Image: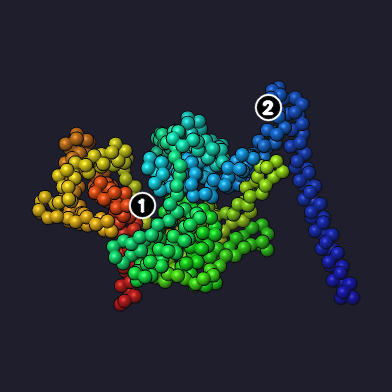
Amino acid sequence: MKKRFVMFMFVLTLVFSFAVKADKQKDAYEALKPFMEVYAIIQESYVDEDKTVPKDLAEFAIKGMIEHIDPFSQYMDPQAYKDMSDDTKAQFGGLGIEISVKDGQLIVVSPIEDTPAYNAGIKSGDKIMMIEGETTDGLDVMDAVHKLRGDVGTKVTISVQRGNSPDYKDYTIQRAVIKIETARCNTIGTDVGYIRINQFMGDGSDIVEKGLKEFNKDKIKKLVIDLRDDPGGLLDQAVKISDLFLPKDKLIVYTEGRSKSKGIEFRSENGELYKGDIVVLINGGSASASEIVAGALQDHGRAIIVGTQSFGKGSVQTIIPLSDKSALRLTTATYMTPSGKKIHGVGITPDIVMEEEIPSSYTASLFDKNVFEDFVKEYLKKHPEGIDTTKKKSVKVSESDVKVLFKKNEDQQLMEDFGKYLKSQKVEIKIQELAQDKNVILKWIKVEVAKNLKGRIASRKAAIENDTQVKRAIDILNTMDKLRKS
């Protein structure tokens, strides 16, 4: 009797599932009836026959359907599908920006360091309102990418809206071959390690692993991981890099999709290579793989997260080839942090919120006019060795510690010299803005001095060492170290 009942329930379940499936098919058929009717009417009666090509109508219909779903799902025509592989290579032609659509607007997720867009002053969060004078309204990401990319050496003009300003600013940027330095590792001073990950691409985890081995060799127990303006990249790189900081068999990230049974877990496999204290820096340009790493280290208590809310791009896109060699890039799941926090549309919340210092429009205009560059050239004519003439004291320059060029008590003198230079050049002086932007101004000047005296590598180190958020991260690490010792 029990067996009969079980068999009856199985058959009933099977019949019910077929009925549900049949109902869904019926609903789909009913929903598609008006579509086919409209298609037939257009084919039969629309005035301009050239606009009724079946393939074109179908493609427009598909794009409209996909755009309704989310900004990360995309239809790729055969050419776009063919070009897609460029996005996962460490070298390609373009401007050097990661873009997305947020709230219906094309925005810059982040500029890639040392690329034409980065050097031109494009910032994370900038809204791209126009490309070559044409509005970006309704433009999907793939179409925008095709408009922005082009032959190396050619130029493209984009109109950008920044922050709450109603005005647009035009940037004409020359396209170049984009060579992405995935990651770099160095020390700040003698006891703090610094890892900058620009994008989670091919050799990123190898570079980070090599850097950590060097830190371990030098007994460096304090580490800053900089993920600001890192738009993400490959999932496997995020998992491998997280693995370097976590004990074996710890959950790094998992996916949730329509079918709970199809979720995938990614766990650490090798055991933590680095066991020191960690601060991770994030901002609104930290997305995707960056958020996976930050979320994993935060949830397992391996790092303190400092900065501002991350971008919130935590969805999984599956590439599904179609019969005509086009493809569908469809969101099929979302990433979840180990503790079950959703990344997509939310982002990673820092443990310590710290806004980045944004210069006033006055100070930014001085930068755009190369005032800092010109000032440093004049300054170095008077102080070729970094000499403080008021104290007759030589200030040494070191590639590993460029900040000693200007000790704390010399910053005020440097600002005074800068003010005198502005006055000599008949540049309008706004005392409030200069005072408000003091840290940014000093950083820009010191970076320029380092570049002139020691080159690009030294200027990069000067930028790191004079970065307010990096300084705050080091303060936190030092406090943790003192608490532990006490």
In the drawing, does residue 220 fall left or right of residue 179? left
Q: Compared with residue 41, is residue 447 higher up or lower down, i.e. above or below?
A: below
In the drawing, does residue 60 fall left or right of residue 98? right
> In this figure, which residue is indicated by the disc labeled 1?
356
Quarter that holds the C terminus: bottom left
Q: Of the two numbered discs 2 and 1 on the same chain, state the one appearing first in sequence.
A: 2
Residue type at tag 2? Lys
In the drawing, does residue 285 fall left or right of residue 392? right
What is the x, y in percent for residue 259? Answer: 68, 59
Label 1 crowd (10 A; few <14 / some 14-19 / many >=20): few
Secondary structure beneath label 2: helix
Label 2 crowd (10 A; few <14 / some 14-19 / many >=20): few
The front one of 201 and 33 is 201
Mark 2–mark 1 Cα distance, whole angstroms, equals: 50 Å
What is the x, y in percent for residue 91? Answer: 48, 47
Of all residues, the one furthest to the top in this rendering is: 47
Residue drawn where x is 55% and y is 63% of the image? 253
What is the x, y in percent for residue 247? Answer: 49, 72
Residue drawn where x is 24% and y is 57% of the image? 398
Contact? badges 2 and 1 (CB < 8 Å): no
Residue type at tag 1? Glu
The front one of 97 and 44 is 97
Secondary structure beneath label 1: loop
> In this figure, which residue is indicated by the disc labeled 2?
51
Residue drawn where x is 68% and y is 27% of the image? 51
Quarter that holds the N terminus: bottom right
